[in-house]
Image: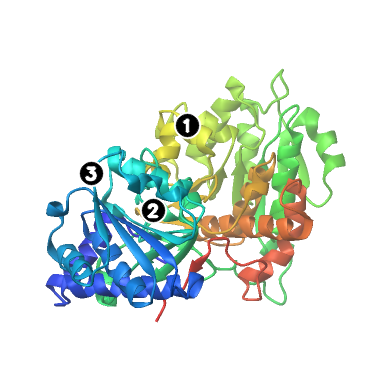
Amino acid sequence: MLLVTADQMRNLDRRTIQEAGVPGAVLMENAGRTAYQVIFQEYGPFRGKRIVVFSGPGNNGGDGFVLARYFHQGGAHVRVFLVGDAERVSGDARVNLDICKNMDIPVREVRSEEDEAFQIHNESGIRLMVDALLGTGLNSDIRGLYRRAVQTMNAASAPVVAVDIPSGLDSNRGIILGEAVRADLTVTFGLPKIGQVLYPGREHVGRLVLVDISIPNRFIEEERIEQALLTPQTVQAPPPRAADAHKGHAGRLFVLAGAPGKTGAAALTSLAAVRAGAGLVTLGVPRSLNPILEAKITEPMTWPLPETDDRTLSLQAFPEILKQLEGQSALALGPGLSTHSETVDLVLRLVEACPVPAVLDADALNAVSRDPGVLNKARVPLILTPHPGEMARLAGGSIQDIQNDRLGVARRFALTHHVVLVLKGARTLVAFPDGSAFVNTTGNPGLAGGGTGDVLTGIIAAFLARGMTAGEAAKSGVYLHGLAGDYCRRSLGPVGYLAGDLCDVLPRCLSGLDGLPAEPASSIPLTAPVP
């Protein structure tokens, strides 16, 4: 499922009108009619019911005028509050405003913050409120009359339906521009918008329903849309094992992880890799920690390496690690590794010299943040898996800067440093060095716990070791990790399941990637187009 920016959707509308010859009034009619069909299915019938429509002066308001007409024809007592001056309404929106007036549908111009329209949420008996204020073109904080209208809808006890996008939501970044409508249902046109699936915007969308308004498929293909949802259709399973395969054929993974107090990260990464199907997993750890890891894990092998006085990996381990990597398929580097200065130097040298594809996480990312340019010197594909704090250190700026433009930051970093970047969080993102990006659809808040990121590193690294490309390993690993979280939520509860529980269910969830029924379905409630 492709995701569009506001500019891309605007261009698709323009081409449909100018090149396909579909009049703008027809597109607006299609939008209002199909939105009415969806709303009727959810909340109808409307005969005798009171419905309030807040419209703006632009095309989003025009969609609201069309909707008001359908409500009226369905027997509803509909009132339209036009926020602003009717003289500002033009084009196709003006045509539909005049139709409403000609059909004696009450349309009230709202020009003052003291207008009674902003008290309507206190009235009883209202069945539905419709947000048709601002649409997808908004790029600055809303204020004045629009803000009051948004507050009025949010204060209502009746359900709120957003037309195309909740007003106040940035359609490209998913951030809130001052204040935004909290819709129970959003009916969006043509293609879903990026901001509708990213947090915090996702919380304002409610149930998202996509409807077709006659945008030609050829125009969508030619738009070169570079972002999409990660769904079962956009991920793939690792290569199947041959019937006569042995452990050496199933992928050899070397994990470098662990420091005092952080042996759990090393264990979880290694165990997740085994559960994700890697044939042989070897865990390289500081020598004094080896007895702890040998007792902690069974299936992965351990490899004691030279250590510093603080019992972290020493730069003296570099030649031994390179020799060990000669027989490996992939490397996982960083979980619980520490930021000891000598360990940081080791990481930077490994990034430049590593002979196999690698996943960099946690303290490997903290090391790289001191010299991100080292990524461009790598000889092999790299996958980076930062959380927002690590991303802020890598890219510069604050965590809030990252969260305000998650997709843009991830895409720019991947392009600049020629890496696959996995930006973790609610709606984990996967950005490729060619500019394309994906938004994950699996996962839940129960994954917000210690160790779950280490599990993700192990899964992705195992897929690399099993022969997948860096891009496909990242996409499938992210999707599977979230799927495992969703399975744990369903079987154990919404919170309190452990990172180790994710490991336990990975083999079952892997069957979903192999074409068997996956449990559960995507957590983004995106409905298919309405005929």
**Where in the figure is residue 347, as x and y percent of width and height?**
56, 32
SS under mark 2: loop
Instruction: Give the class, few, some or many, for how many residues have Cα within 10 Å of label 2's Cα (few <14, many ≥20).
Output: many
Amino acid identity at mark 3? Arg
Q: Nearer the viewer, mark 1 or mark 2?
A: 2
Q: Residues within 10 Å of mark 1 (few under 14, many from 20)?
A: some
Helix, strand or loop for disc 1 = helix
Q: Quadrant of the N terminus?
A: bottom left
Tell us which disc is closer to us: 3 or 2: 3
* Front residue of 467 and 166: 166
Decide if residue 112 is on the left or right side of residue 38.
left
> In the rendering, which numbered label is found on residue 166?
2
| Distance from the alpha carbon under mark 1 to that under mark 2 | 25 Å
User: Of callouts 3 and 2, which one flags the residue occurring earlier in the amino acid sequence?
Assistant: 3
Residue type for callout 2: Pro
Q: Which x, y percent locates residue 172?
A: 34, 50
Q: Earlier in the sequence, mark 1 or mark 3?
A: 3
Marks 1, 3: nearer the viewer: 3
Q: Residue at x 67, y 66 (%)?
A: 510
The residue under the point 53% across, 55% down is: 474
Q: CA distance from mark 3 to mark 2?
A: 21 Å
Q: Earlier in the sequence, mark 1 or mark 2?
A: 2
Q: Nearer the viewer, residue 507 or 41?
A: 41
| 129 displayed left or right of 475 | left
Mark 1: amino acid = Ile
Foreground: 63 or 84? 84
Q: Which residue is mark 3?
A: 111
The residue tagged 1 is 399
In which quarter of the view is residue 176 placed? Answer: top left
Q: Residue at x 76, y 46 (%)?
A: 498
